[in-house]
Amino acid sequence: MDDEKYFLEIIRPLFTDWSQNRWGIEVATSPDQALEILKTRPIDLIVVDVNMPVLDGGQFLTLLTRRYPALKKAALTALATEEKRSTCLANGAELFIEKPGTLEGLKSAFAMLDELVSWKMQPGFQGMLRRVGLQDVIQMECLGRNSSILEVNDQTVSGRIYIQDGRLLHAVAGSLTGEAAFQKLLSLPGGAFQLQPFAPPPARTLDGPWEFLLLEAARVHDESGPKSLEPARGQESPPENGRTVRLIETLICSGQGSPLYQWKCPDAASRVELLQAISHSAMQLGQLLPLGNFNRVEVQCQDSRAVARTVPDRLIFVRVAAENATPSP
Amino acid sequence: MTLALDQWLSSCARSSGTLGCAVQLPGQAPVIRSFNDRFSPASLAEALGCLAESARLISGHGLLPRWFTWYFELGQLRAVLRADGALFLILAQADSTGDRSLEVLTREFLALG
């Protein structure tokens, strides 16, 4: 992907030739075009020009890493700096190459890209939390109804989350178990994780829909900041910074709006209507502004706070009583 | 639009992580400020209309929002509603600098009322 069309016109036949027709090359002059290509056919490697108008290559790499974690990525730039290099590698590029100005340089770049495209993914799964969210991995495992053990480590704690047939069974983090352990692991600002084959857990300490457990962990993390590793016990958390948090209602629906789980929801039909309208508005906003995928909307009211999350196969609404109706810096 | 509000709106650009903002006072034309070329004033104006509609919708379902925030992969969009009917839109980066700007500008906008 490069906004300089002439560069693409030079590269395409040369690289096809040098690869002895092993490579099928698609070209795009904008992120939109590149995303369209990625949607319609399997691609092994994308080479992104860093200096692009509208959405620069660094940001585009972030988007690609989130949407296509298995896609290999290389960044190309005419003006290579250490800052650009760090940004591109941090945003998911496996290679950072200075745009060659000579035929020899192009051959050398081709050799590096050919090497990259021939790399085989190792069995299993490994990643950094800053690149792929732990929450994303858990969602993928649960939506795929997979069974695995997710091992999570950072400098301060090691933990495990047991998932069987897409259900969260058990979590342990240091001396913590259950929801407290789950929330602690999800609140980590960075670290490494690995998916291991499933083995039965020593105990079952997690119960309830995985969506709720994830939302609750996100809520505890959001409300109490990075230091909040306090466990949630039942429906009420212990005071944090002088505040208490009380669950008011929960609703989880299928993507079509059929309630799957509800707790103290006064009018499920009305909530489903609200969730569907939020989903529609999110789509509208996403079309107006280049902000990537929608995650959730949080509503701060005088006496409560609501979180609505809409994904293709789930609509989720959680409302908690909130004492924090004034923004704090 | 008072001069103080207009000046404050322009000063929002100084809040790190802020990509754009807009204010809609009751009965007046919206005032838009874009601080990033990727977000045109026209698209921010449309987003403001969409948020105004969302505010009505959320209120109609028994939730009376003081503000609500849409979290996207690459940014966050907050609508703040003031008791006098003024609506404030802030578009910020999806990171900790954006988070801080949202909180600071929300507090300032509410205090201006």
Image: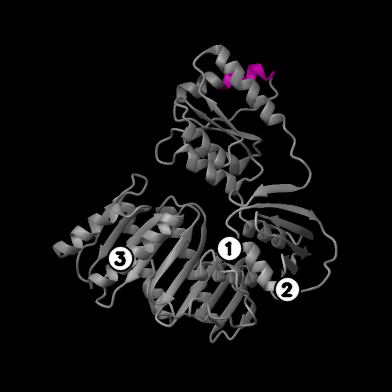
Find numbered disc 3 in the image and state the secondary structure of the residue it sits on: strand
Point 61% across, 73% down: residue: A253
Residue B88: assigned label: 3
Task: Give the image location of residue A95, x and y in percent.
Answer: 60, 31
Q: Is residue A36 visible?
A: no
Circle 2: is it few (<14), some (14-19), or many (20+) Cα within 10 Å? Answer: many
Q: Amino acid at mark 1?
A: Val
Which of the two discs, 1 and 2, labels the residue nearer the N terminus? 2
Q: Nearer the viewer, residue A129 or B33?
A: A129
Using the numbered discs, state the Cα–Cα distance from disc 3 to disc 1 in whole angstroms.
Answer: 27 Å
Answer with the quarter of the image where residue A65 lies.
top right
User: Residue A109 or A189: which is nearer the viewer?
Assistant: A189
The disc at residue A206 is 2
Give left or right: position of B90 versus A32.
Answer: left
> In front here: B36 or B39?
B36
Please report the residue visible at 61 percent of the width from the left and 67 percent of the height from the top. Answer: A314
Q: Does the CB distance between marks 3 and 1 fall below 8 Å?
A: no
Q: Disc 3 versus disc 2: distance between alpha carbons?
A: 41 Å
- Judging from the image, mark 2 belongs to the subunit labelled A
**Mark 1 vs mark 2: same chain?**
yes
Which residue is labeled 1 in the image? A311
Residue B82 appears at what percent x and percent y? Answer: 29, 74
Q: Measured along the vertical axis of the image, is residue A51 above or below residue A265?
A: above
Chain identifier of the residue bearing label 1 in the image:
A
Q: Against A192, is A162 above or below?
A: below
The alpha-carbon separation of the residues under discs 1 and 2 comes to 23 Å
Start-end of magenta stretch: A12-20
